[in-house]
Amino acid sequence: MIATLIAVALAIAFFGWYLLAFNSLVAGRNRVDFTWSNVEVELTRRLDLIGNLVETVKGYAAHERKTLENVIAARNAASNIKGPEDAAASQGDIAKAVASLFAVVESYPELKADENFRRLHAELVVTEDRIAERRGGYNAAVNEYCNLCEAFPSNIVASLHDFPPKAFFDVPDDDVRTAPRVVLT
């Protein structure tokens, strides 16, 4: 009788642990997906702002066609991302394109004084800061989820139910880890 009670208690404890591990993995996976969607919102906002900046610059610097085309090409490529790996790969191109756009702006004092340009630039700086913040939150969620997937004993549940690892959103190049800055006078 005591052996049966012990066996039932162990079975209940195991089942409880199993449910807890499974639910923790599901919550971790959902947190990763949720935080990635927050990153995507800011990346989309950035692309929209870059498009608006290019349109503003076009009015002042029409003969800077090649630079503007390169910025639009980088923006279009970045708009086709399919997850953190693609987003990380596009960060270098988009940052270099924006830097080249701001280099063009330096040659046009009247453009730097344009209120619309100044507003768009300020919004882009804020958006870059939010991307960095959201990237940090996403990477923290990925780290927590990966720890659940890899640490014993929850790794057993993760392998039984196909909880795949998630990719970090790393910026590949130190040159693009910070938002492009231009001092407007």
Image: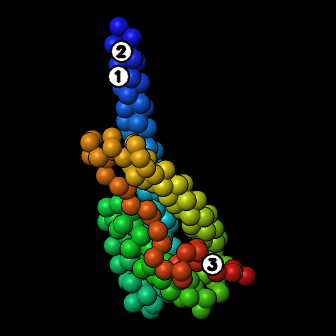
For label 2, the crowd category at 10 Å Cα-Cα, with few meaning under 14, some 14 to 19 and many 20 or more, is few
Compare residues 161 and 1 and report the one nearer the observer: 1
Numbered label attached to residue 11? 1
Report the amino acid beneath label 3: Arg
State the residue at coordinates (40%, 43%). 153
* Residue 79 percent coordinates (x, y): 36, 66
- Position above or below: 4 against 171: above
Secondary-structure class at tag 3: loop
The answer to which quarter of the image holds residue 23 is top left
Q: Report the residue marked by disc 3.
A: 181
Foreground: disc 3 or disc 1: 1
Q: Residue furthest right?
A: 185
Circle 1 crowding by C-alpha within 10 Å: few under 14, some 14–19, many from 20: few
Q: Earlier in the sequence, mark 3 or mark 1?
A: 1
Q: Name the residue under label 2.
A: 3
Q: Residue at x 33, y 40 (%)?
A: 157
What's the amino acid at mark 2? Answer: Ala
Name the spot of residue 169 as percent of width and height, x first: 45, 64
Q: Which of marks 2 and 1 is nearer the N terminus?
A: 2
| Residue that protrudes farthest toward the top in the picture | 1
Disc 3 from disc 1: Cα separation? 60 Å
Residue type at tag 1: Ala
